[in-house]
Amino acid sequence: MTARLAESLVTTEALAEIFSDRSVLGAMLQFEVALARAQARLGLIPTSAADAIARAGMVDAFDTGAIAQAGRHSATIAIPFVDALVARVTVVDRAAAVFVHWGATSQDLMDTTLVLCLGRALPLIQTDHLRLLNALRALSDQHANTVMLGRTLLQPAVPITFGLKAATWFAGAARAGAQMRAAAAQTMMVQCGGAAGTLAPLGAAGPMVAAELARELQLADPGAPWHTCRDRLASYVAACGVYCGTLGKIARDVTLLMQFEVGEVSEAGGGSSTMPHKRNPAAAAAALGAVARVPGLVATFLGAMGQEHERGAGTWNTECVTLVDVVQATGAALASIAASVESLGVDHARMRANIAATRDAVFAERAMMLLAPALGRDAARALIADALAAAQRGDQTFAHALAAHHAARDVLPRDLVRFAAPEDYLGSAEHFRRKLLNEPT
Amino acid sequence: MTARLAESLVTTEALAEIFSDRSVLGAMLQFEVALARAQARLGLIPTSAADAIARAGMVDAFDTGAIAQAGRHSATIAIPFVDALVARVTVVDRAAAVFVHWGATSQDLMDTTLVLCLGRALPLIQTDHLRLLNALRALSDQHANTVMLGRTLLQPAVPITFGLKAATWFAGAARAGAQMRAAAAQTMMVQCGGAAGTLAPLGAAGPMVAAELARELQLADPGAPWHTCRDRLASYVAACGVYCGTLGKIARDVTLLMQFEVGEVSEAGGGSSTMPHKRNPAAAAAALGAVARVPGLVATFLGAMGQEHERGAGTWNTECVTLVDVVQATGAALASIAASVESLGVDHARMRANIAATRDAVFAERAMMLLAPALGRDAARALIADALAAAQRGDQTFAHALAAHHAARDVLPRDLVRFAAPEDYLGSAEHFRRKLLNEPT
Amino acid sequence: MTARLAESLVTTEALAEIFSDRSVLGAMLQFEVALARAQARLGLIPTSAADAIARAGMVDAFDTGAIAQAGRHSATIAIPFVDALVARVTVVDRAAAVFVHWGATSQDLMDTTLVLCLGRALPLIQTDHLRLLNALRALSDQHANTVMLGRTLLQPAVPITFGLKAATWFAGAARAGAQMRAAAAQTMMVQCGGAAGTLAPLGAAGPMVAAELARELQLADPGAPWHTCRDRLASYVAACGVYCGTLGKIARDVTLLMQFEVGEVSEAGGGSSTMPHKRNPAAAAAALGAVARVPGLVATFLGAMGQEHERGAGTWNTECVTLVDVVQATGAALASIAASVESLGVDHARMRANIAATRDAVFAERAMMLLAPALGRDAARALIADALAAAQRGDQTFAHALAAHHAARDVLPRDLVRFAAPEDYLGSAEHFRRKLLNEPT
Amino acid sequence: MTARLAESLVTTEALAEIFSDRSVLGAMLQFEVALARAQARLGLIPTSAADAIARAGMVDAFDTGAIAQAGRHSATIAIPFVDALVARVTVVDRAAAVFVHWGATSQDLMDTTLVLCLGRALPLIQTDHLRLLNALRALSDQHANTVMLGRTLLQPAVPITFGLKAATWFAGAARAGAQMRAAAAQTMMVQCGGAAGTLAPLGAAGPMVAAELARELQLADPGAPWHTCRDRLASYVAACGVYCGTLGKIARDVTLLMQFEVGEVSEAGGGSSTMPHKRNPAAAAAALGAVARVPGLVATFLGAMGQEHERGAGTWNTECVTLVDVVQATGAALASIAASVESLGVDHARMRANIAATRDAVFAERAMMLLAPALGRDAARALIADALAAAQRGDQTFAHALAAHHAARDVLPRDLVRFAAPEDYLGSAEHFRRKLLNEPT
């Protein structure tokens, strides 16, 4: 188990593992070994040196705690790490030590490490994303004809279908997820610029080293260093922010629909430490908690982009931990909301009962559309207000109260039941539902 | 003049005009008139009603102050606006008043209004963006061979060219600008869903009304309402955040390079209210001030995405003002940094002098690459440290101090001048510069 | 009417007026006139010059649009404003023009202007704050014995009183309001430091000018300039953030309690542009919309504190507009939530009915506390789970289902009605309520 | 070593330890043991049960990884922790298991745990804070007479003293630090409210249990639960934000003054992974990196305050991890900037040389104050502009160029050297310096 108690709700076990010390250190070693191999292949350093570096680069041989602590003195863990690697290589093959980190800079190492770790996280997130989309699509299809209250400002508006609601969840998540994946793909590139982005020590071979290194690490070669151009990482972080916004909307709706007094959906849920009767929307709540973390992190990342000259003083570090936090929070929110949606029970009867509880008041708009052209706006308003008041007093339904007025009766359809049937006032709900499910995923 | 004193530095005159009362009100009227026309064309309302609405919808006939104030009681200005329009239409053609805002909801009106205003802002921003890119490209080409210090953590690193620096500015701005434009294009769509996103009052005609309305307003028809899917607007706002991050990086560099003690570039600049000698990087500073506003606004927008059910309670309003602020801040930052870059003077001599002032210390990496393979890492380090100390004491340059050591002399190139010539240690600067300028704009 | 449509929901009419051009310009003139008077009184400039400056400083004589536009070229409106004032004074008394802004700098002018405007806003906010506290206290006292569901994670927990809930609203708002007021008081000080904070042109008289200026403006004299110490303003902005957080909690609860399906409270509310039956929690929603704007603005202000040397490049401007936005959003949220709370109707019967609807399940904790010591934890759990299941099936209440078990019956009180009476399981609700209302205001 | 690589730069070793699993788990056990003891002392549970709970509550007996993982299913780690403790106690004393967590709720446990951990962090932060203040005061006193350039918008303004600059650093840090400590003190209170804040299961004994529990844990008893009033924690987090803002200002200035081209101060600094000549402002950069993390976290915390009803769905978790991050980032920034300031070397000569390099242009304001009253504003401006141009061409100093004009010569002091002596144009620098150092710490 890798996730820590204090942050366990804003990560998943698998993502915590990816950003664990072993994993980060492993990626750092992967970079240095690949760099040496690329340079050896190009004849820039001896093959024996590359071999020695590969042999010395065993994760278990390093004291990550010591590296973490020493890193504070140079404002990067790259320096104590390289020192430690040099020391290890010296033991294995003294002559090879010279060629460790050859021509590279701390940022080459750290940026590429971040990209490598991120690259491991992406498939996990994509898997859960597809799980979520599948669950949402199934839910939408299953409830294409399940009528429920549409609610605006948390008050009954007009009827919709649960299928439509689930389809809007789907469309938002699909679109934002696709954007996030596209933005992620743009970040999967090696950083290789040397001290100030010229690869000066490698002479004319610089671009070839970068290309070879990229191939070795199965990353793209951007053609030029991006040490001062943080826009690709920023776009990914921002896309996570938008995606989490769409997840938060789903989670918010689930918690609201699952309220005891609403009772329209329920997720598997969790219990309480003291109240045996409790069934909490635990997964949706966990998602909301993780989602809430993200906007501030996005702001932090964007604010850290103004890095001075060829490498900024400090905010480069801010970026790294912020991205790590964003990826974990996104993955945690996604895992939770996927679990919530997959386990979602839907109570058709309660949905219909909640519409009925309005005593047909939610058809007041419908009445207005029918009455106003015939009677004029003011007269229609007055009649409807009267009928709404009657319905609210509990005497009768809005439809019957309205039909009690001569003027209205002539305009309303004969069949008052159909007038106040939710199925009959769904407009283009099904049309829109299908359009929304067409969103490419 | 429209921009107000208190916010004049975070907008431009033209953008302030776009979000002025007249302009916002104009867009609101444009929506209602277009809706009526679309519905008349489809035979849903009388043509005479559409005509009356068009005739009544004169900007000057409305009291925006009264609408603003009344809006606070319904948490949207849509309601008092529609009431005022109904009153106006009633005067023009009593029967037509019924068909004002027919089947639509406040959010249809307000979202589309926002999109229409944004649509007016986009070309202005694009124009300045291209101005900036052109200026940066020209600057980069002109200074392809202008050597200067690369600086990391605000300290001399190794030489680069100013052309390379300008090219990294270009590439970041070009890429982020292209993303911003793509995201903007996605938002140019009509909102048309009615009370809860089903267009129920329009029966089967809903999608046709939406399509016709879109055509009328020269917006896209998204196929389904997006009242609860705020991801497109959010992606645009986030893209502005990334773009502003790249602008801030340029502005930061300009202010640093223009420091009196550095003196490598200077923009036209501004003066002081009390010090006649002052030449401030006023445009770059104005850009930094506007840019700093954006990350927090992006966070606000993302945080407001979790809107409840079919329309949230409150955060929908937050979105609107936030987007207005982001667009203005982005446009203001862009206008300022474009002006700064266009006016930028570059002092070649000072750039070279600043390199020279390091007494060749910036070639220590170069020395290391040459000496370490020959002498071993530790011996090389020791020699270089000695020579750096000598250079720092001011006795001689690093190159000469190093060459004074036997061991080093044999490894260093004969021509010490070339060893310490910035032009000779630029690596792939020019190669990368060209790649960076290839970024599609 | 001063507030603009695009931002009308995040300000009040009175606050928009305070930050209007006339008001800001008025404060700028107030500073310059007071400075001249202070200097004349100390014999540093001729009294006639101070008189001329006072005569020339009429708000109507200035073109704020031109100042706004010109300000963009110097990254502050102070410079064109001073130029305009000099021009005006020259007309009135040529010799006096020299003494305009004598020894002062742009930041003295702008910071003091901001403080003066803020000073006008504070009493308005305090008045609404006291309104809110009074309304909350009255509500709490009135409903000291009104039982309702306590809800955690949006699910029924155990009973509380509405008086207790209102008291927690009160305590949070009272405490955060007191902090906000204390932080505000710390900002009410003159800025007077000259070009770089030494008041060099005033020689030894500097501190006396600052003191006299402060007296003239009825502000405190901090003893030293604070041009680079933005912590007092930041603390005020942050305190607004905390205060808005407490307002947002109240508004959130109101919108939730007012849900049709919950129906426990209702505010006066607002209508819909299309649905006659709608009664929206408009004031609470407006409050939520304004509140949501604030955390991002606080982050912006805090992020702008790292101002370079004796005056930063740009972020000083960010501060100003951010503070203006924060004050207006805070005032708007407060006005809305005060209106909401003052108009709040409480439905005792519905509150009690919502408890009853749980079929006594909310007394499961109570049962556990009684049964577990007697029967052991596991046996107690099993019995309670059985009884909860029975209650959920709807056969009988939890209390009766539980009492149907022999083992439980012996432990439960004879009087099952009292066991499941909300009034009988309120613990220290009233004790805590009184404590919370003791919070100093 | 506890801090992880990925976040090692935004914490300190000691703070990472405080929020480690062992430490968090220890605090959780401390709460449960103290609760049991308090209840036993009041006769609410058997003393033997309290003893058994104390015996069972050994940190080593728990699997924190399993608790972390299980916590995701209930949206809190409290529930699996309590289950695990019950299991442990059952082994020790079966009868005692019933009394674990007696009458308490998850939030009582988690909030108090957070407070306990925070309480351990506060003295560490206070120690470093005093270190920093002492170093700043000493620096200011030592350099009371060290003249240097005041700089605004990163350009030379007028002379100041380094003592004054250090004193403004001191005053900001002292004031913000005092506020942060005061806010921290307000958070040091027990949370004890039971399921929904009434302590219902404890009957009339609730407040006594809370008081006794507080005493046991050496925390304050707030008199009522604060489960829904998050303002105290928020105020502390916000105060950290303001404090970090003041630290960031110091760190920003250090990195700027240490630029090679400015060279006025230097901290011990750190090296490079590739460039032997590098001396980076590593500590100041590390501080900037940590500081940049905080504003976004503050926004997150404030945004999470709108928690629903008696316990929110999700954002309560956001609070916890956010506070943990803020405390660590604050402590890390403080430790770094304290180290930077303590090691700060000051180069008097370079400071004076940088003034001289302006060729007296920084005395243009002084000239203006002398010439304008005598010659009129326009004539004075013209003369000064001429002289500045001459100085900039490099012919002579501004003072001499100015004195070459008849009109100016009569007004300038005879002794041109004194006119252009920095010591002679410091105004109230020393007066202000002493005032600033008087700020209570």
Image (cartoon, coloured by chain):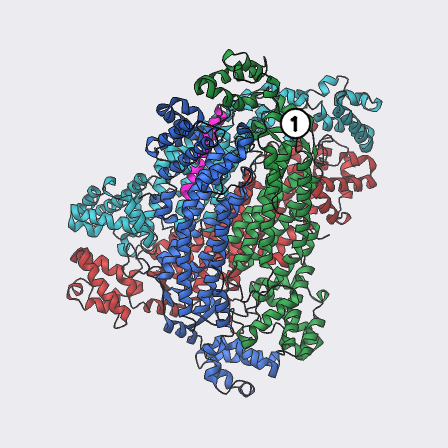
Chain colours: A blue, B green, C red, D cyan
- Secondary element at tag 1: helix
D291 within the magenta span: no
What residue is rendered at 61% in x and 72% in y? B101
Does residue B77 lie above or below A37 as drawn?
below
D340 within the magenta span: yes
Q: In which quarter of the image is residue B62?
A: bottom right
Q: C193 and B12: which one is in front?
A: B12
Give left or right: position of C43 versus C357. right
Determine if residue A194 is in view: yes
* Quadrant in which the N terminus of chain D is drawn: top left
Main SS, magenta region, reads helix
Question: Quick one: label 1, few (<14), some, or many (20+) residues within 10 Å?
Answer: many
Does residue C173 lie above or below C36 as drawn?
below
Give left or right: position of D436 versus D427. left
Q: How many tags in the picture? A: 1
Looking at the picture, how far across and down is residue B28, in whole percent? 65, 65
Mark 1, chain letter? B
Q: In which quarter of the image is residue D163?
A: top right
Which amino acid type is shown beneath numbered disc 1?
Met
Give the farthest residue toward the right.
D406
Q: B76 and B174: which one is in front?
A: B174
Looking at the picture, how far across and down is residue D126, in whole percent? 42, 32
Q: D35 and A53: which one is in front?
A: A53
Give left or right: position of C303 versus C68. left
Looking at the picture, how far across and down is residue B415, in whole percent? 60, 17
Looking at the rendering, the stretch of residues picked out in magenta corresponds to D323-343
Q: Which residue is tagged 1?
A: B351
Looking at the picture, how far across and down is residue A427, in whole percent? 51, 75
Determine if residue D215 is in view: no
